Every structure is written in C-alpha cells, then in structure tokens.
C-alpha cells in the first residue's frame, strides 16, 4: 500500500468518525446549503479548512476564520497573513496528497473555477466540500455569513457582511440619479475577452451608474472582437493591472488608433486593481467605490459636472 492509499484509508476512517459523531450528537450538527444547492453538514465548527480559490481565502479572513485555514491555492495573497498559509496547488489543479496530509475537516471550493474532476474526487474521499459561486454582490455577503457559520465565527462574519451590505447600499443611493455611462472592461488581449453579464461586476457597474456594454453576454468572461467594441462604443474603458504586468501607457497605445470610440476620443481609459474588480471577495465593495470615482471623473469629461 503506497502513501497516497494509506492517506485515503485514513480519510475514510475520519469520515466514519464524522458520521458517528453526527449520529451520536445530532444536536450539535451544522447544516446549510452551499452555492450549488448541496446540503453540507458538519458535526461542529470546522477547525481545519482548505480554500481552493483566492476569493474564498479573502472571505474566510473577513469572516474571522483566517486562523482556521491550513491550506490555500496560488494567488491567495490577501490579507498579508494569507501568504503564510501552505499552498496545495492552483485554482485549476490541486495536490490531493497534500490536501489529505493536512487532515482538513472542511474544503471550500470554487464551483466553476476549480476542476470539476478535482471537486468530484474530493467528494468521493468523503471530505466535506462546500462550493462557493457568488454571482452577484449580495452573494458575497452571503458567503461571508455562511463561512462564519461553518467556522463558528458568526459574530465576526455577520458584522463584516453587514458593513459590506451597508456600504453597497450607500454607494447605490449616492449614484442613483447620475447620468449612465457605458463601460468596457478588458480582462486580457490575446484572446480579447471581457466581463459579461454573468459576472458579479455587473452589479458594480449598475450601482455606480454604469452599463457594461457586454451585459447581454451570459458568460462571465466572453471573448469579444475589436469590431464589437467599436460598434458598442464605450464611454469608459478599464483594464486590470495584472499584478504590475500591464502599464497604462502601453495599453492606451494599443487603442489610440481607434479614435471613433468615445472612451479613446475623450481619453477615458483607466488601469485598475484587477483583484478588487474581478475577485468575488469582500474587497469588491472597494472596487465598486473606486469605479464610482472613475465614472464621476468621466462625467466631468463628458458633461462638465
């Protein structure tokens, strides 16, 4: 029997103990539904959690459960303490042997970001797996609350979720009467793809009085053409900095010849922190606040107010 097989056997034994604990102590069980609609049951709050996506790591820290994390994946770099947690792979490829060695009592995965094969394999090992998939800003707050329940840090989690929701409500109220601007967000250039209507960022645009020109695309990150962008003619164009890999001058230079686009004509191209704009984490509220500021600046260029 090799090392991995022994770990699988040990995991099966732990799963049996978990089942026994639920039978003997039903009053202490935690039961809730994850974002995939699957019922998750734990005998007690999780003390050893593995996160399989950066946004999950951030939400766990916001929920007061950062000290329960025993494993994360690459790019789990916020807050600073997250960088010290052992890695078990990347969002699309995980090391099962490392995960088993950590003896987690809960794994939180990314429903559409993690490999479906990997998620199914983890479930067959009888490890409790909660799937996260926030499709709008309110779902981010829900994740924070749910993680607090799973980790037994409800008080901290509820406070953080309340603050998140209150800030969003304030931003929405402050921007409700402002002129709507059309916006294009460029995720990458080869291939050229953007954020579609299936991405939570549609809420950020709406709250700030912006309209994503590709909101009619159901896919979260559809591939688009330059011609389609020209036709839809955004008034504001954004792109992420990709952790310092992209420079605003270089990016603008690639669009300068498309002067028929209003955003290019009026020099309304902005480089933003991709993590707070594209991660469905608690910092998305910072992204919304930043976007509202950009659109206010753009309105001055178009309307003088």
Image: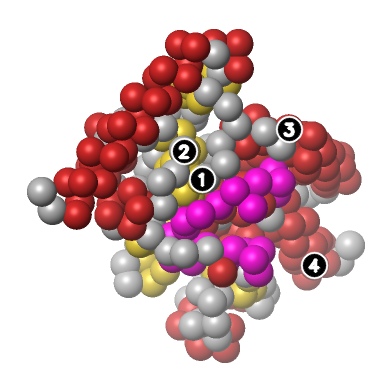
222, 211: nearer the viewer? 222
In primary-sequence order, the first of circles 4 and 2 is: 2
Q: Is residue 172 above or below residue 54?
A: above
Q: Which residue is mark 4?
A: 297
Comparing marks 4 and 2, which lies closer to the viewer?
Answer: 2
Q: Residue at x 73, y 32 (%)?
A: 154
The answer to the question of whether label 2 and label 1 lie on touching residues, with beta carbons closer than 8 A, is yes
- Name the secondary structure under disc 1: strand
Magenta highlight on residue 10: no
Residue assigned mark 1: 49
* Element assignment for label 2: loop
3D distance between C-alphas at marks 1 and 3: 16 Å
Q: Which residue is mark 3?
A: 154
Residue receiving disc 2? 105
Boundaries of the magenta span? 62-82
Q: Are marks 4 and 1 in contact (CB under 8 Å)?
A: no
Please tell me whether mark 3 or mark 2 is closer to you in this view. 2
Q: Secondary structure at mark 3?
A: helix
Q: Earlier in the sequence, mark 2 or mark 1?
A: 1
Residue 14 location (% of width, % of height): 36, 33
Whichever of callouts 4 and 1 sits on the residue coming sooner in the sequence is 1
Whole-percent x, y for residue 267 in the image: 66, 77
Q: Position of residue 299 (x, y in %)?
A: 79, 62
Nearest-to-viewer mark from 3 and 4:
3
Give the alpha-carbon distance from disc 3 to disc 2, as whole Å. Answer: 18 Å
User: Going 31% across and 38% down the picture, which residue do you hit?
Assistant: 11
Spatial CA distance of label 4 from label 2 is: 48 Å
């Amino acid at each position: 029997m090799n090392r991995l097989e022994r770990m699988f056997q040990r995991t099966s034994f732990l799963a049996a103990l978990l089942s026994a604990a639920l039978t003997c102590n039903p009053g202490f069980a935690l039961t809730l539904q994850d974002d995939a609609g699957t019922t998750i049951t734990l005998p007690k709050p999780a003390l050893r959690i593995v996160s399989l996506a950066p946004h999950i790591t951030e939400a766990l820290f916001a929920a007061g459960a950062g000290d329960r994390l025993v494993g994360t994946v690459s790019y789990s770099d916020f807050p600073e303490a997250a960088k010290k947690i052992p890695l078990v792979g990347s969002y699309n490829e995980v090391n099962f042997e490392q995960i088993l060695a950590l003896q987690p009592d809960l794994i939180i995965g990314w429903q559409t970001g993690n490999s479906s094969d990997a998620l199914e394999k983890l479930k067959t090992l009888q490890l409790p797996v909660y799937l996260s998939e926030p499709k709008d800003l309110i779902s981010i707050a829900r994740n924070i609350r749910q993680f607090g329940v799973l980790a037994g840090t409800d008080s901290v989690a509820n406070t953080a979720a309340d603050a998140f929701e209150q800030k969003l409500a304030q931003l929405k109220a402050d921007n409700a009467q402002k002129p709507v601007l059309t916006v294009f967000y460029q995720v990458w250039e080869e291939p050229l793809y953007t954020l579609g209507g299936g991405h939570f960022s549609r809420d950020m645009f709406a709250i700030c009085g912006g309209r994503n020109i590709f909101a009619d695309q159901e896919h979260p990150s559809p591939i688009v053409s330059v011609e389609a962008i020209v036709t839809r003619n955004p008034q504001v164009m954004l792109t992420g900095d990709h952790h310092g890999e992209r420079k605003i001058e270089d990016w603008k230079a690639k669009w300068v010849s498309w002067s028929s686009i209003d955003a290019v004509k009026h020099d309304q191209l902005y480089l933003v922190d991709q993590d707070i704009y594209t991660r469905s984490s608690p910092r998305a509220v910072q992204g919304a606040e930043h976007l509202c500021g950009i659109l206010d600046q753009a309105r001055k260029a178009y309307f003088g107010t």
